[in-house]
């Protein structure tokens, strides 16, 4: 039935699995994607949206590296928003509202049109391990499928348990069974496992809602897109809506707390701190009279609606009664109630930077199995695991992104160095170099590295190089060209900014906080330069950021370069920390468990102090 031996087998076809299979296959590996249901490839299990704060940067990075998430998001988008535009560009984050059915369809089509990808529908119940190395998988039918490497992207399916009030039943998500066998085998092999929880809100019939009493949430007037490729921006969009809970709603929800699996002890695992359930919100923020609810359509043509902000595992009758008391939901009809799900995960400190496990060679973990939450976090891990599985079996150098190169680098480093005891979600605050890691320059940062590896195609590189060349030339134009005081002063007066008495370089006045590209376009020679060089919106935005934030960018680059010196000091493999008696006991224990590769990574481990790092540096002759 199968190839004699695949290069890469990917288990699970969610966001992580789909990106892993695409990456490995596009690099040339013969890849098998095994999933329990081929109809749910790329399924949006929770909200019908991609991107958001920091997550949008990750989607742009995936796209810049040659992954598919940005393209699929653009093709299935029904609304686009650039979040945080009132803040600096390091905080700008793209987000799409998506057509759930089209999103999954686009993923399926993208993978079917990727050479080297084979598909198989069945549950994987175990791994084939020989001499400490993964050599394939075993299915529930007892079929052995051999491969040179295996990527596990099991999502919430490993011993998944769904909770609705006092009712609980096995399942990986609504309507689908849980996966068994893998956790038990991995624990037997010496892996540490744990349990996590996530939840989802009710889905309701949009025809039963009164949108006239809700607040419309339209998309951007001039929508952008995720992908740096030639996908099209939206020409029309669907509105979302906002409404609020009330004290009455909160009181009705509290009536069911005694039957809540969160409060009666049935659920013992931790859920995502930054995406709490509605019962968790009214319990933790008891002083708040109301909470926002976002009413999100599930697609262009469907009437199904996602009630963002009302994630819950309360009994279905309590959910219904409370939601009926929300403004606009008085006549609501349920498609299905919300629920919580518990599932197995494996603390990610058991992984290398490549996402290969330390215990079993050529076995990779990606997505929620590593304790993360979110489509974007999962997809980025899948991409990195797929890339590194291919590189490892072809005896090529591993592909690792540093913390100053990508949010993906921050994500992976956080996971394997610090671990996580609750579902990990990416935020801009997690990145110490976020001025460098903007959504607008992901292609400039990552496409050259991806092309060098063989994933990003030449047309991608050429497009990126043209953008870089044009934006650099435009910045130089501002550095070299002077303005006339009589031209700029009326603009400065209007902005309540101090006027100038003599000509100076445009770069200097453009650096002022209130002066924008629109103002600069009024000066002699600027609009001519733009039209003569055919500069598009993307180049104008890039040039403006480079001018206005040049000082901050230079400072962060300098800080990153300093850190890189520690990144270059390698720690020998299997280093015996017990012989360094000057290290604190905690540092010895943590360093021994995590086995950092560099001094820089060691410095980020919780419990390892600066004095411990000094001891290591002295020992390494530094």
Image: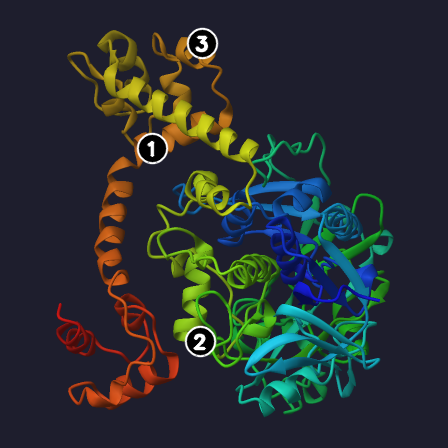
- Toward the front, the furthest residue is 4
Q: Of residues 363 and 446, which is closer to you in this image?
A: 363
Distance between mark 3 and mark 2 Cα atoms: 52 Å
In the rendering, at what x and y percent does residue 449 appear? 44, 45
Q: Which residue is mark 2?
A: 419
Which quarter of the figure is the C terminus placed in?
Answer: bottom left
Contact? badges 3 and 2 (CB < 8 Å): no
- Residue 541: x and y in percent read 44, 30
Closer to viewer: mark 2 or mark 1:
2
Instruction: Kindly report the distance in space between the C-alpha atoms of the residues bearing marks 1 and 3.
Output: 21 Å
Quadrant (top left/top right/bottom left/bottom right) for the N terminus:
bottom right
**Residue 445, position as x, y percentages in the image:** 42, 43
Q: Secondary structure at mark 1?
A: helix
For the point 27% across and 67% down, the residue is 570
Label 1 vs label 3, nearer the camera: 3
Question: Which sits earlier in the primary sequence, circle 3 or circle 2?
Answer: 2
Residue 364 visible, this orientation: yes
Left/right of residue 223 with respect to residue 443 in the rendered view: right
Q: Relative to residue 199, is residue 535 depicted above or below? A: above
Asked if residue 165 lies left or right of residue 270, the reply is: right
Q: Mark 2 or mark 1, which has the lower sequence index?
A: 2
Helix, strand or loop under label 3:
helix
Helix, strand or loop at mark 2: loop
Callout 3: few (<14), some (14-19), or many (20+) C-alpha neighbours within 10 Å? few
Which residue in the protein does label 1 denote? 546
Residue at (58% x, 84% y) in the render? 269
Q: Picture coordinates of residue 416 (x, y %)?
A: 43, 72
Instruction: From the viewer's side, name the closer residue of 108 and 461.
Output: 461
The residue under label 3 is: 532
Q: Quadrant of residue 131?
A: bottom right
Q: Earlier in the sequence, mark 1 or mark 3?
A: 3
């Amino acid at each position: 039935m199968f190839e004699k031996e695949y290069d890469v087998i990917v288990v699970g076809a969610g966001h992580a699995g789909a990106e892993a299979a695409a990456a490995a296959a596009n690099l040339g590996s013969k890849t098998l994607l095994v999933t329990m249901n081929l109809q749910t490839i790329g399924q949006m299990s929770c909200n019908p949206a991609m991107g958001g704060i920091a997550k949008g940067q990750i989607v742009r990075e995936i796209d810049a590296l040659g992954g598919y998430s940005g393209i699929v998001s653009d093709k299935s988008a029904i609304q686009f928003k650039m979040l945080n535009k009132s803040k600096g560009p390091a905080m700008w984050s793209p987000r799409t509202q998506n057509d759930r059915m089209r999103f999954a369809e686009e993923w399926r089509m993208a993978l079917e049109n990727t050479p080297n990808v084979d598909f198989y529908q069945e549950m994987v119940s175990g791994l084939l391990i020989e001499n400490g190395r993964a050599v394939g998988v075993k299915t529930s039918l007892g079929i052995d499928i051999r491969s040179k490497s295996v990527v596990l992207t099991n999502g919430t399916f490993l011993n998944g348990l769904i909770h609705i009030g006092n009712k609980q039943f096995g399942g990986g998500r609504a309507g689908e069974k849980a996966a068994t066998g893998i956790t038990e085998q991995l624990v037997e092999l010496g892996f540490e496992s744990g349990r996590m929880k996530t939840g989802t809100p009710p889905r309701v019939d949009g025809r039963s809602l009164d949108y006239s009493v809700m607040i419309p949430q339209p998309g951007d007037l001039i929508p952008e897109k995720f992908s740096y490729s030639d996908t099209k921006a939206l020409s029309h969009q669907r509105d979302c809506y906002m409404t609020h809970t009330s004290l009455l709603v909160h009181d009705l929800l509290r009536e069911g707390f005694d039957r809540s699996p969160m409060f009666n002890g049935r659920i013992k695992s931790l859920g995502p701190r930054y995406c709490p359930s509605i019962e968790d919100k009214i319990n933790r923020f008891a002083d708040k009279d109301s909470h926002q609810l976002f009413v999100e359509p599930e697609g262009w043509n469907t009437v199904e609606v996602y009630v963002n902000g009302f994630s819950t595992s309360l009994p279905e009758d309590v959910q219904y009664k409370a939601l009926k008391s929300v403004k606009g939901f008085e006549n609501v009809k349920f498609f299905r109630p919300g629920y919580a799900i518990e599932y197995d995960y494996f603390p990610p400190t058991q992984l290398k930077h490549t996402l290969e496990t330390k215990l079993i060679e050529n076995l990779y973990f990606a997505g929620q199995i590593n304790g993360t939450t979110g489509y974007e976090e999962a997809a980025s891990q899948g991409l990195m695991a797929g890339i590194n599985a291919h590189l490892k079996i072809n005896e090529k150098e591993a592909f690792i992104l540093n913390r100053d190169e990508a949010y993906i680098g921050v994500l992976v480093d956080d996971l394997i160095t610090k671990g996580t005891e609750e579902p990990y979600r990416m935020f801009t605050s997690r990145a110490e170099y976020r001025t460098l890691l903007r959504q607008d320059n992901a292609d400039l940062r990552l496409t050259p590295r991806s092309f060098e590896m063989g994933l990003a195609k030449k047309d991608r590189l050429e497009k990126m190089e043209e953008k870089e060349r044009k934006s650099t030339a435009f910045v130089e134009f501002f550095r070299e060209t002077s303005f006339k005081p009589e031209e700029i002063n009326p603009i400065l007066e209007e902005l309540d900014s101090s006027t100038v008495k003599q000509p100076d370089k445009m770069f200097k006045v453009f650096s002022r906080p209130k002066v924008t590209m629109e103002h600069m376009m009024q000066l002699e020679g600027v609009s001519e330069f733009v039209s003569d060089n055919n500069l598009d919106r993307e180049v104008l935005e890039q040039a403006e950021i480079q001018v206005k934030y040049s000082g901050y960018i230079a400072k962060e680059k300098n800080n990153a370069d300093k850190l890189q010196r520690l990144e270059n000091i390698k720690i020998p493999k299997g280093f015996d920390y017990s012989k360094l008696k000057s290290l604190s006991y905690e540092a010895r224990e943590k360093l021994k468990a995590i086995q950092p590769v560099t001094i820089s990574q060691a410095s980020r481990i919780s419990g390892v102090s600066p004095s411990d790092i000094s001891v290591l540096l002295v020992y390494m002759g530094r």
